[in-house]
Image: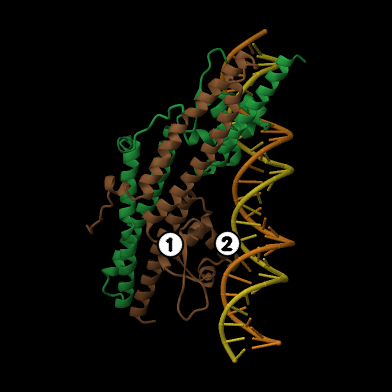
Chain colours: A green, B brown, C orange, D yellow
Amino acid sequence: MSPQLKKDEVALASIENAKQTIIGAIAETMDLYGVTPSAGRLYGTMYIEGEMTLDQMKDRLGMTKPSMSTAVKKLRSNGMVQKTWEKGSRREHFVAESNFFKSFITFYCKKWEREVEMNVTAIDDAEKELEAIINNDQVSRGIREYAGNLNNQIRESKSYYNWLTRLIDLIESGEIFTYLPIEDIEKE
Amino acid sequence: MSPQLKKDEVALASIENAKQTIIGAIAETMDLYGVTPSAGRLYGTMYIEGEMTLDQMKDRLGMTKPSMSTAVKKLRSNGMVQKTWEKGSRREHFVAESNFFKSFITFYCKKWEREVEMNVTAIDDAEKELEAIINNDQVSRGIREYAGNLNNQIRESKSYYNWLTRLIDLIESGEIFTYLPIEDIEKE
DNA sequence: AAGTTCGTTAAATTTAAATTTAACGTTGAT
DNA sequence: ATCAACGTTAAATTTAAATTTAACGAACTT
């Protein structure tokens, strides 16, 4: 082998190593986004490699096609991967959302919305039930007081869910970026 | 049974039902905080019942003590539960963090800090490796260009991690509350 | 010091999640 | 129309996580 080819081969191995460093870090922090490590590795791979088909994924990760199919489904449901079309190809192509700001906004807002919705509904239901007891003078005083205390405790959390709702708005609307602008990172 | 006792019994059952509504909602949204549903149910229970011992937990949830012990450990590592001391009792008591703002801040900031730290480290490592190739004139031009493009792609995400770091500061310092004040929810 | 109580760790079991193999349905090509 | 290429779903298997049973060790009691 010529010295040139040898150098190139070493360089390519080094590039692959750098890629795996990035992919590994992404995969490791992906549990935050509620996906399994292997779905995280897939996302990282697509982020680095760009557009891919299911067959390319299975080759790159050494897994089966059905498992790629389900992992992509999960990542798509989180808005982290999108389907693209490639003219002239019958295969479906998928591409990782490469704008981390978008992923952040979509992911957390969706989750927080669910949190607010579930808990506020539960609070309202519980309040109704407790107030029926509080206002029922056929129930012993001690029990009515207990219901009252519980009701107050539960009601306190409402200001948190109200705040979280406004946080979602702030982030979803992009207004957050007026308080916290995106800074360019210049080459040092 | 006297009519009075009967009414009270019904009221108590209704209170328990209201509690379970709240506990269920908390447990269901707890996956956001990376804990299992049963750890979520435990947190919800402690939130509603206040200070508890391991034995009280196991009785209330119908599980074993070791599993309460490990669940508490997990919740403590997230800052969602704290140990308290009860004078005159040898048993350890635990109490759920009832300030949701505090939980939010502690939890997300910790997670995001880990995300930033892991990825920035990986990016710096990968950058170093890629720059060695880019600056090595013994490597073919095409490969060096490829390394350059990859390096640029990777570098772009730095502004996201920079922004996330500033978001953490904004929240950890409490400055977020000047932009997004906590509103009192008054009784309607 | 022997006996208890309490909490944790370790091993064993159960339960649930992830992955693969196999089979199906659809679409486009010949 | 038949065949091959794709992607998905279903069942079977493997792997990992959660839970329990069992055993240990520290701290207090008598």
Residue placed under numbered mark 1 in the picture? B20
Is residue B86 shown to the viewer in this render?
yes
Name the one closer to the observer, B148 or D28: B148
Horizontally, residue B82 falls left or right of residue A16, namely left
Q: Is residue D7 above or below residue B111?
A: above
What's under tag 2, amino acid-wise? Thr
The residue marked by circle 1 belongs to what chain?
B
Q: Tell me the SS state at disc 2.
A: helix
Write the residue at 33% across / 72% down.
Answer: A146
What's under tag 1, amino acid-wise? Gln
User: Which tag is nearer the camera, tag 2 or tag 1?
Assistant: 2
- Percent of width and height locating residue B35: 52, 53
Name the one closer to the observer, B19 or B76: B76
Q: Quadrant of the N terminus of chain A?
A: top right
Residue at the extreme right: A1
Whether discs 2 and 1 lie on one chain: the answer is yes
Is residue A70 shown to the viewer in this render?
no
Q: Is residue A156 above or below residue A79?
A: below
Mark 1 surroundings within 10 Å by alpha-carbon count, few (fewer than 14), some (14 through 19), many (20 or more): some
Write the residue at 49% across / 33% down.
Answer: A80
- Percent of width and height locating residue A27: 57, 38
- Asked which quadrant contains residue C19, the reply is top right
Name the one closer to the observer, C24 or A105: A105
Mark 2 surroundings within 10 Å by alpha-carbon count, few (fewer than 14), some (14 through 19), many (20 or more): few
Name the one closer to the observer, C1 or A102: C1
Q: Is residue B185 above or below residue A97?
A: below
Of label 2 and label 1, which has the lower sequence position? 1
Q: Which mark is residue B70?
A: 2
Write the residue at 35% across / 42% down.
Answer: A168
The residue marked by circle 2 belongs to what chain?
B
- Percent of width and height locating residue A150: 34, 67
